[in-house]
């Protein structure tokens, strides 16, 4: 796995030093996946490419060094843990509603050299209303959590004005992005041109949908989950 990761990081224009930690993370993920539902991908090469290198691509396109970053709906740590291992000087918080996944990530972080990663159990729509977290991050990221209009409501409240929200999407997300334009504007965001990338060693192309936070998010957002799901902005 480490060889694939090293070559892939190089292809993405990233330093290869993080390959060993990513490979160890992949091994721990495979082992834990036997007892906890973490990922449907079980082949080590596929884990390296479709999880690790897919998420690494974000670090190739978004400056994270020194930034305070929140990964919304991180699950087994994607993309947040990968980004933390590649950019150790970012302040990374992983957030997920499933406590056991956050407990597992906290338990493996020291072994990966990421002891300062914060693993937060909670719901984004609740923590986004908390003064402890609201508009407290330079960057929010999210992969495979929700449709963009819902995701923008869950994520943009965490981003400070001048910061960035990056949603990892497929290249056929154009209609989804067009439909979310109104929500993004209401929530204080402005869509920037998307960035497409091909995962090294595959013919899979994915898209980074980037939203700049240009105004504070109005206080009524995020709404309760049932409400924002039933009536997306
Ligand atoms: N981002 C990871 C990835 O790409 O592999 C996990 C994706 S998984 C399909 C979606 C995750 O989002 C789940 O772990 C779920 O618990 C979390 N999630 C969904 N809605 C959430 C919410 N409102 N607040 C916090 N976590 C949420």
Image: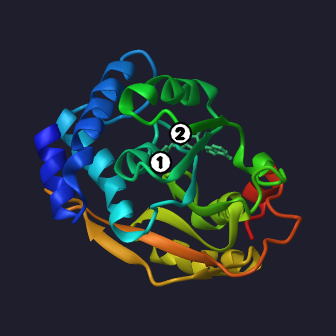
Q: Is residue 177 positioned above or below 75 on the image?
A: below
The image quadrant that residue 184 belongs to is: bottom right
Quarter that holds the C terminus: bottom right
In the image, taking residue 142 as reference, residue 216 lies left or right, namely right
Residue 80's mark? 1
Q: Assign ligand 1 to one image quadrant.
A: top right
Label 1 SS: helix
Front-most of residues 162 and 195: 162
Q: Position of residue 18 (x, y in %)?
A: 27, 46
In the image, taking residue 31 as reference, residue 169 lies left or right, namely right
Please identify the residue farthest to the right as the structure is shown: 220
Inspect this view and state whether residue 134 appears: yes
Q: Is residue 40 positioned above or below 49 on the image?
A: above
The image quadrant that residue 202 belongs to is: bottom left
The image quadrant that residue 140 belongs to is: bottom right
Q: Position of residue 91 (x, y in %)?
A: 55, 50
Residue located at (46% from left, 40% from top): 77
Inspect this view and state whether residue 171 appears: no
Colouring scheme applied when the structure was drawn:
rainbow
Q: Position of residue 50 (x, y in %)?
A: 28, 48
How many discs appear? 2
Q: Position of residue 75 (x, y in %)?
A: 51, 38
Label 1 neighbour load within 10 Å: few <14, some 14-19, many 20+: many
Sequence order check: which comes first, mark 1 or mark 2?
1
Q: Are marks 1 and 2 in contact (CB under 8 Å)?
A: yes
Front-most of residues 218 and 35: 218
In the image, taking residue 202 as reference, residue 29 lies left or right, namely right
Q: Is residue 189 positioned above or below 101 on the image?
A: below
The residue at which mark 2 appears reads as 117
Label 2 SS: loop
Q: CB at mark 1 closer than 8 A to ligand 1?
A: yes
């Amino acid at each position: 796995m480490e060889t694939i990761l090293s070559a892939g990081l190089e292809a993405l224009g990233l330093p290869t030093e993080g390959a060993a930690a990513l490979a160890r993370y992949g091994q721990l993920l495979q082992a834990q996946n036997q007892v906890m539902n973490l990922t449907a991908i079980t082949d080590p090469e596929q884990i390296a490419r479709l999880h690790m290198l897919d998420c690494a691509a974000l670090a190739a396109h978004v400056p994270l060094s020194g930034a305070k970053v929140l990964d919304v709906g991180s699950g087994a740590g994607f993309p947040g843990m990968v980004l933390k291992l590649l950019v150790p000087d970012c302040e990374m918080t992983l957030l997920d509603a499933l406590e056991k996944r956050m407990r597992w990530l906290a338990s493996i972080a020291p072994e990966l050299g990421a002891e300062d990663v914060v693993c937060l159990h909670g719901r984004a729509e609740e923590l986004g209303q908390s003064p402890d977290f609201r508009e407290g991050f330079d960057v929010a990221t999210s992969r495979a959590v929700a449709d963009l209009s819902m995701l923008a409501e869950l994520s943009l409240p965490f981003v400070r004005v001048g910061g960035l929200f990056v949603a990892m999407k497929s290249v056929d997300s154009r209609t989804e992005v067009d439909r979310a334009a109104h929500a993004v504007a209401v929530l204080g965001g402005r869509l920037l041109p998307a960035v497409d990338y091909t995962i090294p060693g595959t013919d899979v192309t994915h898209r980074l949908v980037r939203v700049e936070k240009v105004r504070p998010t109005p206080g009524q957002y995020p709404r309760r989950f049932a409400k924002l799901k039933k009536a997306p902005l």
